[in-house]
Amino acid sequence: MTLQNQNQNGSAGPKVWSGHLKYQGETTNITAILMRYFGALLFIITCNALHAAAIKPRMIAYQHDRTVADTDTIVRKTSVSAGISYGSDALFFGRTGPIKYPFMSTDIIINTKPGFFVYSSAVKVLGYKPLVDEIDLGGGYYYRLSKKFTGTVSYTRFIFNKEANIIKSSASNDINWKNSYDWKYLKTSATVDYLFGKSYDIFTTISNSKYFESSFNIFNDQDFLSINPSVNLIFGTQNFVQRYAVDHDTRLEIDNIATINENGRRARANAKFNMLNYSFKIPLAYNMPHYTLEASYKYSIPVNVEGALKNRRESFFNFTFYYVFY
């Protein structure tokens, strides 16, 4: 099973999940047998590492507003997908809050054969008072112009608890338009996001990735491993950072982070369209026909940081499970 991740670089766009059955030929030579046991060992090691990380939540980080599996194929059929994710920090368009916010999230997505989809998600920040910090509702359309050229356009509405502290709480609405082209040896995606409501921002995200599947099985003749490493660049304005500083003045004072009047120099600097973030991601997934279990590592490099946030380079580890119903 695989998944098309529509918001893999911190954008607020949708996640369109769908699965497929990978055909596996017979493996009778000694190399295939060795690879099978090597794959099983790699998967066991990954699961053990994730179990240890779950005991220490702050060792886990998350990719963006939510963590989602990051595999790379879409099958046009009607389906319902449900997923659960865990991470240790909220990253939104290359920016994090003044402290780490470990979280869990759930998502449900309904995909239709013509390409229309609707989705909803809920986010709970661990260790803080609100039972639910965020609920997202949205919908959109997936299109395929050719075998190599695909895209989505969508709208998302963000609803936050008044006590939510995550960086994304400075946003209200997002329009997302993503286009991808598969060059065979590399897949390039260009995404444009427009945030409006509480703050007004525009972003462009450029991603280059390469998807690989194992030619061997692990535990049965239907499972396989996949990896989809990517390099991502985010450009945009960051008025949402200043909005966050104004909305969370008490929180920033507690964290000993100074703010400047919203009409001051930093507010003007936030309105400039600049490079915001570089990131490198390596996701490893275990796939079955109806579900996927994924762990990933991401290294994020924020640049041109303005306003009240003191963002630095950071490593993120993500863990995601989702199931597809046909």
Image (cartoon, rainbow, N blue to C red):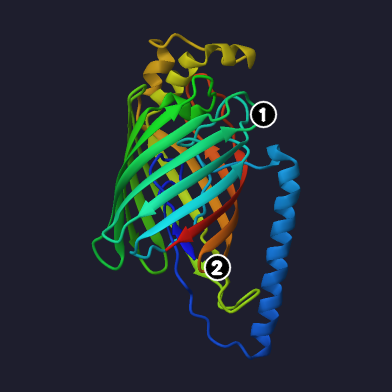
Vertical side of 10 occupied by 27: above or below: below
**Percent position (x, y) of residue 143?**
27, 57
Q: For the point 49% across and 17% down, which residue is it?
A: 245
Residue 288 numbered tag: 2
Residue 127 numbered tag: 1
Callout 2: few (<14), some (14-19), or many (20+) C-alpha neighbours within 10 Å?
many
The image quadrant that residue 262 belongs to is top left
The image quadrant that residue 78 belongs to is bottom left
Q: For the point 62% across and 77% down, which residue is it?
A: 220
Q: Is residue 210 visible?
A: no
First in sequence: mark 1 or mark 2?
1
Q: Say whether residue 69 is left or right of residue 145.
A: right
**Percent position (x, y) of residue 196?**
32, 27
The extreme left residue here reads: 145
Q: How many marks?
A: 2
**Percent position (x, y) of residue 82?**
49, 52
